Each structure stands twice: as structure tokens, then as C-alpha cells.
Image (cartoon, rainbow, N blue to C red):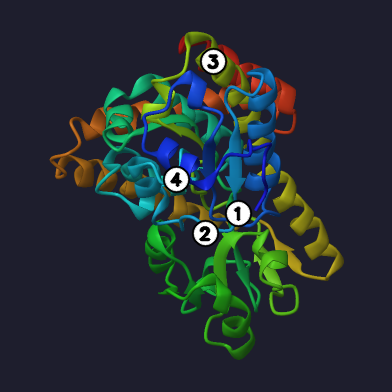
Amino acid sequence: MTRISRPGLAAAACAAAALVAASPASANNLIYSIFVSSEHLLTKDVAVPFAEELRERTHGEIDFEVVSGGALAGARETLKAVEDGTVDAGYIIDIYTPSALPQTALLSDLSLLIDNSVVASAAMTQTVLLDCQECRESFEKHNVTPLGFVSTSVYALQCARPVATLADVQGLKVRATGAWAALMSELGATPVNIPTSELFEGLQRGAIDCSVGPVSHLPSYSLYEVVTDINEMPIGAYAGGLPLDMRKSVWDGLSDEQRAIVYDLAPKYVAAGALGYNRVNQEAIDQSRTQGIAWHPEAADIVAVYDAYKEKVLAETIAKGEADGSIKDARALVEIYSANLEKWTEIIARIGDTDAAALEQALREEVYSKLR
């Protein structure tokens, strides 16, 4: 747990304050909950420095205590914890609560369309904050004001045997969930749903032949000893993670000046999260090469099946959304997000995906300056 200058108040006073809707005067007693560890990049590079800088810029008027490791709320419970005031902000994952956040959960079904996580972070942030009122209404219904999304790094197929061509993938047992499980079936593999904590044993004992995930899984789950081959084709990323948000009743109590400070800081930490994921992933890639893991280039036959399947996913996602009565216009929502992916692909092609200052400025100009 990382503590950020929390004023010393009696426990009874803290408990009483938690029951009162926040105002500018009480915004210096706030809790941010994140279910990943204190060493995770979203804690170290986003939550903690964001809280520190926000406290400094507001002269202590907005003061968060960052509690990591799921000590207050797990991944599935964070939305509810923010909603009921147990915490005042937190790292929210939409796919764990799809009925509460149907619009962004639907967009998460389009994970396979992502081949650049920096693009995806910016596109999802713009879609929700600027272009999708019903997305914001769903968050606000659960007492959440969204402030910035961060995508994971792109996924890759990591195996205990060669995976150079489509024929190599046929019949393999692959740990994959969600959109990636369906993709593996399309490629002729058999998806297996096991927790990431069992990856090492599964690969070592042959219960699975491969796993789909970011290459940073190699150090996270000690897989360097059991993964021998990786196919370098990017196969999507999850862009529905919301590390920057605030309980709406707290947000509503802030002054215009305080909200302007939050909006000024948010693009910096969306950029920090997106580039942080890429940095950690690249470190794992570099280490994998020193460990002797073979990297196979994109195979034309795999790419062909994958590209055709992405078109199928797009149509199926629209149909799924149109069947969901809680989504007003699924086709328009998907089209907006797809257009934003294209827009940010062009922007990132121009500014690159390694320059934090350039990404921060682009986010400020294209999104956050329009929120004031």
C-alpha cells in the first residue's frame, strides 16, 4: 500500500466523512483502490504519481491515498466500491461488469482489431470522454466520472513448440479467454481456460502448448524456462481498463479550477500508462531473445485467416450490441470507435509511439482541451 500525505484524522471522523458527499473542502480525504500490486506499472507510473501531482497542484485540496494489491476491492468489485463510496476512485475493468457498462464492454469485444496499444488507449479515451454520451451515462449511473483509459500491450502467441505457420497452430492447446479463445478456434487450435497462475505448470507438463497474452507474461509468470517460440504477429489488446476516474459525487463537489487541473494532468498519465505497458513489454521481448526464445515472423496464411476473422468479429459485435436493449445504437458506437482507431493510427504514425510528451500533447489537443 502506498500512502500519499493523508492527513491524520481520528478514525471516527474519517468514517463520518466517508458518509458525506465530497466537497472541495473534504476532497483531501480520498481513497484510490487498485487491485494490481504496488510494483505494477499502473500503480508506480500512473496512480501514485497522479495522486502526488494532483495533491501538489491543488495545494492539498485533492489528496488521494493509493491502496494497491486489492486490499480494499478486487478487480470485479472496484466499480461497486466506487459507486457505494467505499473508495473514491479505482482501476475499473469493464468486462467484469458488462451489464453495468454495456457500451465499453461491447467495445472490448473488438480487442482483436488492435495492433497498437498506444493507438487503442487514445481511441478508447476519446470515444468515451468525447464521442459517446451513453457510455458516460452508464458510468455516471454507477457514480463514476471516467477520466482516461489505458490499453494493455498487444498480445502474442507464446508456445513450447514452433509456431511459424498456420499448420503449426493446428490442434494446439492454447490458453486463451474471451475474444482470443474464439480466434484460436478459428485458427484450428483448441482454447483452454486456465488462470494465469497455472501457465508455468501447464506449459511444463503439456496441459497446454501455448498461451495468448502480452510478452510481459514471461517475467510475470516465470515462463522463460518453458516458452521456446513466439509468433510476432500482434493479436489484439484489451483497451477497456479505466485507471483514471473519480466518484461522481466527489467530482461534482470540485470547483471548476480543480476540475481543470485534473483535465490538465489526465493526458500525462494516460500517456504514462500506455507507454509504460509498452516499455515493460519491450523489456520482456529483449530478455526473451537473450534467453534463446525463437521469434517467428508473421506468416501470410495466419494473417489471412486473422484478417478475415476480424471482419466477422466486427459484424458479430454490432449484432450483439443491437440485441442488447441497454445499448441505444450499437452500429454507431462501433463505427465511432473504429473511426477513432483510424484517426489515432494516423496521429501515432506521425508522432511515434515512444514519445510521452508528444502523446500527452496530442491527447490534450484532441480530447482534454474540449472537455473544459
Residue 5 % position (x, y): 68, 36
Residue 119 picture location, percent across and down: 56, 33
Task: Residue 233: give its label.
Answer: 1
Asked whether the beta carbons under mark 2 and mark 1 sit within 8 Å of each other, the answer is: yes
**Which circle's residue, 3 or 2, is located before the other in the chain?**
3
C-alpha gap between disc 3 and disc 2: 50 Å
> 172 and 11: which one is in front?
11
The residue lying toward the viewer, choosing from 371 and 232, is 371
According to the picture, the residue beneath numbered tag 2 turns out to be 302
Secondary structure at numbered mark 2: helix
Give the foreground label among 3 and 2: 3
- Which label number is shown at residue 280? none
- Mark 4 — residue? 92
**Do callouts 1 and 3 mark residues in contact (Cβ within 8 Å)?**
no
Which residue lies at the image location 75% right of the left edge and 79% below the top edge? Answer: 225
The mark closer to the camera, 4 or 1, is: 4
User: Which circle's residue, 1 or 3, is located before the other in the chain?
Assistant: 1
User: What numbered label is drawn on residue 258?
Assistant: 3
Observer-nearest of 209 and 127: 127
Task: Say which residue appears at 77% left-offset and 69% top-offset.
Answer: 293
Q: Secondary structure at mark 4?
A: strand
What's the residue type where badge 4 is placed? Ile
Is 15 positioned to the left or the right of 258 in the image? left
